[in-house]
Image: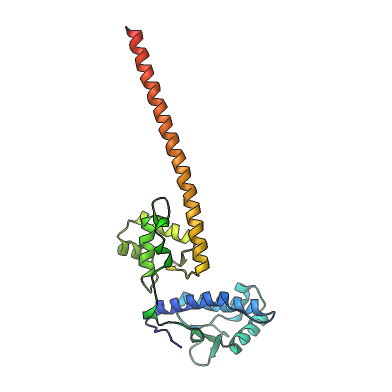
Amino acid sequence: MNVPIIKNRDDVRIVLRKMRTGVKRAHFEARTGKTDRAVLLFLIKQGIEVGAYNVYPGTRNISVDVGISKETASKSLIRLKDAGWIERQSSGRRRLKGADIWRIRFESFQYETIDDLDHSHPLLAYADIWTPSGLGINAQRVLQYLSATTASMNVKELMEITSLGRKATYNAVAKLSGWGIIAKEGKRYFVEPITPQELEYLVKSIDKRYQLNLKRRTKESLYRKERASNRSVFQKNWVEEKKLRLE
C-alpha cells in the first residue's frame, strides 16, 4: 500500500478530503451504519479544519453536530475504532476536559503518494464549457491553478497567481463554487474530488444551462437590433416629412 508523503498541513487536508469522498461511498454495516458514517465525517471535517489526523471532538460536540445523544456518540466511536477507522491516542495533551484524542487512520485507504497525484482537473478537457457564453476563461484559469497545486488558496493568492483583478477572481470563484467544482473552508478554496458519473452530469448540466443563456442572449440581441432598426427608419421618415413641410 502506498502511504501519502505528508509535508505540511495542506497535504493532510488533501488526504482527508479524499478519505471523506471514500467514506461517503463506503458501505457501513447494520442499523448503526448511518450514525457511524455521520460521526466519522464529523471527525474528518475537524481534521480538515486543523490540518491534522489527531482530533479531540468530545461526545458533546459530536452529539450536537450529528444530532444524537452522548451515549450514542460514545458507542459510535467504539464501533469506528473496532472497524479500524480511528484509534484512541494514549499520549498527547488533552485540550478539552474529558475529551479523548482520536487519530483518523488514513492509512486504511489506498492512496498514491502526494507527489504522484494527478492534479489536472478532468473538467478542463471540455473546451465548450469555458467559452464566454459558458463558465468563461477566467474560471478556467482559476481552476487550472487550483487543481495544479496541493494547497488551498484564498482570493488574494488566486489574484497573484492568475494575474486577474479582484472582481474577475471573485466572479470566477463564484461560478466554480456555484457548480460545486470547488469548495470553501474559511476563506480558502480547494478543488472538490469528482467521479466520472458526476463529471458527465456536470458537463451536460453546464452545457444545457449556458446554451439556454446563449439562446436568450441571441433573442435579446436580435430584439435590440430590430428596435434600433425601427427607430432608424422612424427617424429617417420623420426627417423627410420635416423637409417636405419646410418646402
How is the rendered protein coloured?
Answer: rainbow
Q: Residue at x 47, y 44 (%)?
A: 215
Looking at the picture, how far across and down is residue 223, in whole percent?
45, 34
Q: Quarter of the image containing the C terminus?
A: top left
Q: Quadrant of residue 79?
A: bottom right
Q: Quadrant of residue 234?
A: top left
130 to 189, vertically: above or below:
above
Q: Residue at x 49, y 48 (%)?
A: 212
* Residue 16, visible in the rendered structure: yes
Q: Residue at x 39, y 80 (%)?
A: 114
Tell me: 207 left or right of 67.
left
Between 155 and 70, the one nearer to me in the picture: 155
Looking at the picture, how far across and down is residue 237, in whole percent?
38, 18
Tell me: 204 left or right of 151.
right
177 to 12, vertically: above or below:
above
Q: Quadrant of residue 191?
A: bottom left
Looking at the picture, how far across and down is residue 159, in whole percent?
33, 61
Q: Residue at x 36, y 65 (%)?
A: 144
Looking at the picture, how far across and down is residue 93, in whole percent?
49, 88
Residue situated furthest right in the rendering:
31
Total marks drawn? 0
* Residue 169, visible in the rendered structure: no
Tell me: 70 left or right of 130.
right
Tell me: 172 left or right of 95.
left
Residue situated furthest bottom in the rendering:
90
Between 189 and 63, the one nearer to me in the picture: 189
